[in-house]
């Protein structure tokens, strides 16, 4: 586990599936969170066409970022937070 200053959180695992264009970020503790824009930009640097990013804290699902065209949404614990351009 390392502290990733761009994400403003500790990271225990980072994965990307090129076939599904899906990224996964694991943080070590439940309740940990990351900076939305930084997380999306990190995966966009891996693949500009990334479509979905899931984050987990301590193995527990945390936030899902979903891209639709040029906009991103965030859903946390089932609560939808709307769309934004990043």
Image (spheres, helix red, strand yellow):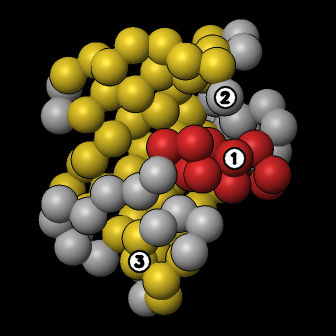
Check if mark 1's residue and mark 3's residue have beta carbons within 8 Å: no
Name the residue rendered at 32%, 19% in the picture: 81
The quadrant holding residue 44 is top right
Name the residue rendered at 16%, 65% in the picture: 30
**29 lies above or below 74:** below
| Residues packed near mark 1 inside 10 Å, few (<14), some (14 to 19) or many (20 plus) | some
Helix, strand or loop under label 2: loop
Quadrant position of the C terminus in the picture: top right
**16 lies above or below 10:** above
Quadrant position of the N terminus in the picture: bottom left
Name the residue rendered at 29%, 76% in the picture: 28
Work out whether residue 19 or residue 46 is closer to the camera in this orientation and state it: 46
| Distance (Cα) linking label 2 and label 3 | 23 Å
Residue under numbered circle 3: 10
Per the rendering, the mark at residue 86 is: 2
Residue under numbered circle 1: 41
- Which of the marked residues, 2 or 3, is nearer the chain's N terminus? 3
The quadrant holding residue 64 is top left
Mark 2 vs mark 3, foreground winner is 2
Q: Is residue 61 left or right of residue 36?
A: left
- Which of the marked residues, 1 or 2, is nearer the chain's N terminus? 1
**52 lies above or below 11:** above
Residue 45 visible in rendering = yes
Work out whether residue 81 or residue 16 is closer to the camera in this orientation and state it: 81
Helix, strand or loop under label 3: strand
- Which of the marked residues, 1 or 3, is nearer the chain's N terminus? 3
Q: Is residue 78 left or right of residue 24?
A: left
| Distance (Cα) linking label 1 and label 2 | 8 Å
| Distance (Cα) linking label 1 and label 3 | 17 Å
């Amino acid at each position: 586990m390392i502290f990733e200053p761009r994400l403003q959180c500790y990271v225990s695992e980072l994965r990307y599936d090129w076939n599904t264009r899906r990224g996964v970020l694991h943080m070590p503790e439940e309740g940990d969170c990351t900076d939305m824009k930084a997380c999306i930009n990190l995966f966009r640097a891996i693949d500009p066409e990334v479509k979905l990013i899931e984050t987990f804290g301590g193995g527990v699902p945390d936030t899902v970022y979903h891209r639709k065209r040029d906009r991103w949404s965030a859903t946390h614990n089932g609560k939808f937070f709307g769309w934004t351009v990043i």
